[in-house]
Image (spheres, helix red, strand yellow):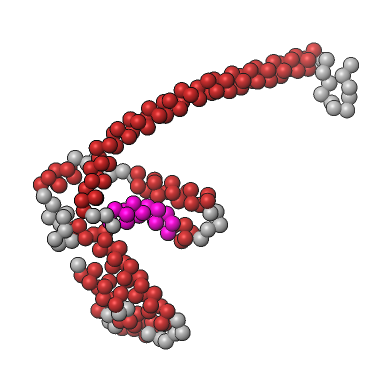
Amino acid sequence: MYTLSKLQEWGDNPVPLFQGTDELYEDLQDAKYAPYICKIREPHPTDDLVIKTLGVACRAAHDKLKSHSIEHLPGGEYNTPSRSVTSAAALLDGSTNDTCESDFGVLDRQCLAAPSGNPLSISAMVRAKRDHVTEWAAMQSKEDQEKAVTFARTTAAKLHETKNKQLAKLHAAREPLRREKIQKRRLNQSKKAALFASRLQAVKDGKLVLNKHKVNS
């Protein structure tokens, strides 16, 4: 809660944070930090822009942290989870790197789509794509969120089974074409092998001259 309150305070008035007078800098009262404190207090033409940027950044951080942690804060659903919640959590599998792999997959596609893009812009686009579902869910009512989660839990296995059936049908439909391609490839390979063998035999028999400036007799 302290972090949220400070972010909200800095969002409303970022000047103390900018000037180094906020209590955040209490640990910098030592004499060795004096040059740093003096340096950041020197006036600069961009001070107003920096102060406004700090305010916007603090407000955004406050809103993001609050939206992602409200359920875990005092009074939230998961601050003091019930026995049913802890039992359900205990049944979950161990942590995986699926989320990281998914992030890298999205990043790879974005880099291919915009090879000359700014790395920060591409990273922001990846984060936006990853947060889109969460942000959409946060805008729904509690009842609709429960319905969506219940639907996902009860239909995941059925959707997976349906997907496997569709893939099996697709593979069956493509099987004749696949076999035809394999047969053509093997025929071409056998022709190349026969041609190579005949040329090799001609060289052995002395009937083929390898010098391109000479003509075979």
Q: Which image quadrant for residue 189? A: top right
What secondary structure predominates along the stretch shown in magenta?
Answer: helix
Q: Look at 37% across and 79% down and name the residue there.
A: 51
Residue nearer the viewer, 122 or 191? 122
Residue nearer the viewer, 50 or 39? 50
Q: Which image quadrant for residue 136? A: bottom left
On screen, residue 119 versus residue 15, left or right, reads right
Q: Look at 44% across and 85% down and name the residue there.
A: 44
Q: Which residues are magenta?
A: 124-138
State whether residue 188 is above or below residue 158: above
On screen, residue 179 versus residue 65, left or right, reads right
At which x and y percent is residue 135? 32, 56
Q: Look at 83% across and 15% down and name the residue there.
A: 207
| Image quarter hosting the C terminus | top right
At which x and y percent is residue 9? 26, 76
At which x and y percent is residue 139? 28, 57
Task: Tell me if residue 16 is in the magenta stretch.
Answer: no
At which x and y percent is residue 1? 19, 67
Task: Tell me if residue 125 is in the magenta stretch.
Answer: yes
Q: Which image quadrant for residue 131? A: bottom left
Residue nearer the viewer, 128 or 86? 128
Q: Look at 47% across and 48% down and name the residue there.
A: 108
